[in-house]
Image (tube, rainbow, N blue to C red):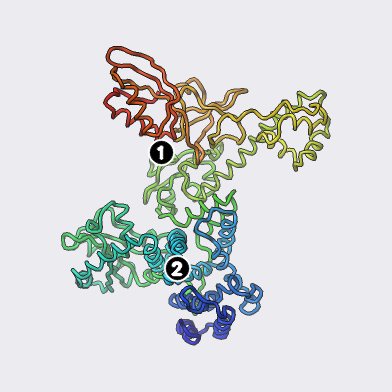
């Protein structure tokens, strides 16, 4: 553990103007506050915040950040109060300590109101001062370094998964790659111990087999660049175990088959030399197609800049090479933290980075804890691509983004009014995936509005939050309109027309706030017709309620319908979860749900159509198939057995045709979803007794 004078000297070594008295005061305060508390390792508890502060001194962070690190657990784990921190160390430190404390309360299994609210508060705190995040990342890194001392294996795994899912991606998002790699390695060791041991043992054996291989390649690279007139600093390393395991999993190969486990870095003086070095290297060794990335002309969203290429070295070894300047290297090592190393020159960056601004916008639109957590994870963790507007403006998006994501990234109004897109001059559907470097032009119409089915292919949190916000607003308008229509039908059955005070009186009796709430409640069937009649005109039903709710017509959730609106599945096409579906409106009847390819849709107009999708947990449906069997003993029994083995259920059977060779049957089958049905049909077609099996 760092002693008091050692910690202070570290800060003063890179920031002579730091508040030495505040640093000493914080050290003493933390030691006294934590007192005799112990960590799982048996060390004094105050050793942890001191070591966290030490990690941050390696990043040359300012005195307020170091003091926040020293104090970050005092409010949560001791009798110290936020008022104590504010009085002794000022508003900035008090606010940052509060922000770190709130993030500490977020748990890995975070599908709860409390966790979402903590995340909301933390993001708001972080948007004001990103140093909060830097302290929390250092805190988590030190906890991972000492994870081995926690005796409960389940707790260790929970902390490791939390690190892998939340904190390592956060570190990556702000460009702190060294933090990210160490967190991933330590978490990987806990979550996948056998894979970790296997990979590290194999890496150790490779080192023994070729002890100086990396050094020889690095020396050759330096000599090559020197002959090209470029003075470069060359370093080489093996990729860390988690990175190797991830590549093995993605490519489905063994470690022996994985060729690019070595990476080298060339650090030069100028941006021009970066490109010259790239040319020298590509003239000497063949480049691996598709493995070149120019993050200098198009930096990552976290500010990372570098050239990446992979080459075939010595005819059989694939290696990765990164080329960057010293300034780029500082940014790559420290990421966002690098900005805070310039206090001495009074240069302070804008504390809000762009992806945090997106998260703050999402906070305003999320309707539930689940939405908030889903969108923030999307915004923080996904890989990025670069696309361009027709005017050449660079838009950064997650990998897999579509033009609808692009439109909302440019402006919310553009997203709301999108009707199509041109990608590289070619008109494409809004669900088209954007590729790296595409030029995207959004086609818009003022008559357009967000569609529910956009949620099927919008992947950015910003786009999904805006679409859901519009859908909720539209659904409420539709619900209120439906409720008003039902209300008019209900009051027509009253003995006499209601007076002007009828609705205000009904609101009071039903304990509702306004007329819109009443109409919404009627549409959602929160009250029976009889209850509404009694509220509007007491005594009108003689105490009898003859207008109870109709029986539920189907339990499967359908998105795109106003909640409470009745629907039923078409008997002609029998849709099941997973099918693309559409609804048909007919006056006075429930919505009829059809498969998108149902022939009966030809008899309808698009004005009658309702764009629908299945609910997230939709499962179970009745599909109809036509199956032709060989006319031989036991054929039908064999098919029935096969259907049972595939976990489907026969609900109905009709023989349509029979001759001396074959017989054709129609079967009603209970299946989980469309994918289950397709697997079942494939299994039936493979049976010897089956001539053909198709969906009716």
Q: Position of residue 22 (x, y in %)?
A: 57, 82
**N-terminal-most mark, 2 or 1:** 2
Q: Position of residue 166 (x, y in %)?
A: 47, 60
Task: Return the residue nearer the eye: 240 or 472.
Answer: 240
Instruction: Please provide percent x and percent y for residue 405.
Output: 47, 47
Labels in figure, total: 2
**For residue 199, above or below residue 564:** below
Q: Secondary structure at mark 1?
A: strand
Seen from the viewer's position, the closer of residues 696 and 362 is 696
Please report the residue visible at 55 percent of the width from the left and 77 percent of the height from the top.
37
Q: Residues within 10 Å of mark 1 (few under 14, many from 20)?
A: some
Residue 357 rendering spot, x and y as whole percentages: 53, 58
The residue under label 2 is 151
| Quarter where residue 495 is shown | top right
Q: Nearer the viewer, mark 2 or mark 1?
A: 2
Establish if 624 lies above or below 185. above
63 relative position to 309: left or right: right
Residue 313 as seen in the image, left or right of residue 445? left
Looking at the figure, which quarter contains the C terminus? top left
Residue 366 against residue 576 in the figure, above or below:
below
Evaluate if marks 2 and 1 touch, with contact meaning CB atoms under 8 Å apart.
no
Q: Could you classify mark 2 by the number of other residues whose Cα lies within 10 Å: few (under 14), some (14-19), or many (20 or more)?
A: few
Name the outermost residue toward the left. Answer: 315
Q: Nearer the viewer, residue 290 or 618?
A: 618
The kind of secondary structure element at disc 2 is loop
Residue 523 visible, this angle: yes
Would residue 173 be visible to someone looking at this image? no
Query: Disc 2 and disc 1: Cα gap in Å?
Result: 59 Å
The residue to which callout 1 is attached is: 427
Residue furthest top in the image: 659
């Amino acid at each position: 553990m760092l002693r008091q004078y050692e910690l202070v000297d570290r800060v003063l070594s890179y920031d002579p103007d730091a508040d030495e008295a505040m640093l000493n005061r914080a050290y003493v305060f933390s030691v006294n506050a934590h007192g005799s508390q112990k960590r799982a390792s048996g060390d004094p508890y105050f050793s942890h915040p001191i070591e966290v502060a030490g990690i941050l001194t390696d990043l040359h962070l300012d005195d307020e950040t170091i003091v926040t690190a020293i104090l970050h657990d005092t409010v949560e784990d001791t009798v110290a109060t936020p008022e104590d921190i504010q009085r002794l160390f000022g508003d900035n430190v008090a606010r940052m300590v509060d922000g770190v404390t709130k993030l500490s309360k977020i748990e890995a299994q975070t599908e709860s109101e409390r966790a979402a609210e903590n995340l909301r508060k933390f993001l708001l705190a972080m948007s004001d001062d990103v140093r909060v995040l830097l302290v929390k990342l250092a805190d988590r890194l030190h906890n991972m370094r000492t994870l081995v001392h926690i005796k409960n294996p389940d707790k260790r795994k929970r902390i490791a998964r939390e690190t892998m899912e939340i904190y390592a991606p956060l570190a990556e998002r702000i460009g702190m790659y060294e933090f990210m790699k160490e967190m991933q390695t330590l978490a990987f060791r806990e979550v996948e111990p056998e894979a970790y041991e296997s990979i590290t043992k194999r890496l150790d054996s490779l080192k023994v087999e070729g002890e100086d291989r990396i050094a020889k390649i690095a020396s050759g690279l330096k000599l090559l660049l020197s002959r090209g007139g470029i003075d470069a600093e060359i370093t080489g390393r093996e990729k860390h175990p988690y990175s190797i395991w991830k590549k093995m999993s993605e490519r489905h190969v063994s470690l022996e088959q994985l060729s690019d486990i070595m990476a080298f870095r060339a650090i030069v003086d100028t941006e021009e030399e970066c490109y010259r070095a790239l040319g020298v290297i590509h003239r000497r060794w063949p480049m691996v197609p598709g493995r070149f990335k120019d993050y200098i002309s198009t930096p990552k969203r976290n500010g990372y800049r570098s050239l990446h290429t992979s080459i075939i070295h010595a005819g059989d070894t694939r290696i990765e090479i990164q080329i960057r300047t010293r300034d780029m290297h500082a940014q790559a090592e420290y990421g966002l933290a690098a900005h805070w190393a310039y206090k001495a020159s009074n240069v302070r960056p804008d504390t809000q980075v762009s992806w945090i601004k997106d998260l703050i916008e999402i906070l305003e639109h999320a309707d539930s804890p689940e939405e908030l957590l889903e969108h923030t994870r999307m915004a923080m963790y996904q890989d990025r691509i670069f696309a361009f507007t027709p005017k050449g403006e660079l838009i950064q998006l997650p990998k897999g983004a579509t033009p609808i994501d692009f439109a909302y990234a440019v402006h919310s109004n553009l997203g709301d009014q999108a009707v199509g897109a041109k990608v590289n001059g070619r008109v494409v559907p809004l669900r088209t995936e954007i590729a790296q470097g595409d030029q995207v032009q959004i086609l818009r119409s003022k008559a357009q509005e967000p569609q529910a089915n956009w949620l099927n292919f919008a992947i950015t949190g910003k786009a999904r939050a805006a679409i859901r916000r519009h859908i909720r607003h539209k659904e409420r308008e539709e619900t209120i309109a439906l409720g008003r229509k039902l209300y008019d039908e209900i009051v027509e059955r009253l003995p006499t027309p209601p007076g002007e005070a009828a609705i205000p009186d009904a609101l009071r009796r039903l304990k509702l706030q306004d007329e819109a709430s009443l109409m919404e409640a009627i549409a959602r069937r929160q009250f029976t017709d009889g209850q509404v009649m009694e509220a509007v005109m007491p005594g009108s039903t003689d105490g009898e309620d003859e207008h109870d709710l109709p029986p539920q017509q189907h339990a499967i959730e359908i998105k795109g319908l106003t909640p409470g609106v009745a629907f039923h599945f078409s008997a002609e096409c029998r849709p099941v979860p997973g099918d693309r579906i559409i609804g048909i409106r007919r006056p006075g009847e429930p919505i009829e749900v059809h498969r998108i390819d149902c022939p009966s849709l030809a008899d309808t107009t698009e004005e009658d159509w309702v764009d629908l999708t299945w609910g997230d947990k939709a499962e179970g449906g009745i599909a109809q198939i036509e199956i032709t069997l060989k006319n031989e003993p036991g054929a039908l029994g064999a098919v029935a057995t096969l259907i049972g083995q595939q976990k489907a259920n026969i609900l109905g059977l009709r023989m349509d045709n029979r001759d001396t060779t074959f017989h054709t049957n129609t079967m009603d089958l209970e299946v989980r979803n469309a994918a289950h049905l397709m697997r079942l049909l494939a299994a039936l077609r493979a049976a010897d007794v089956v001539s053909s099996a198709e969906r009716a």
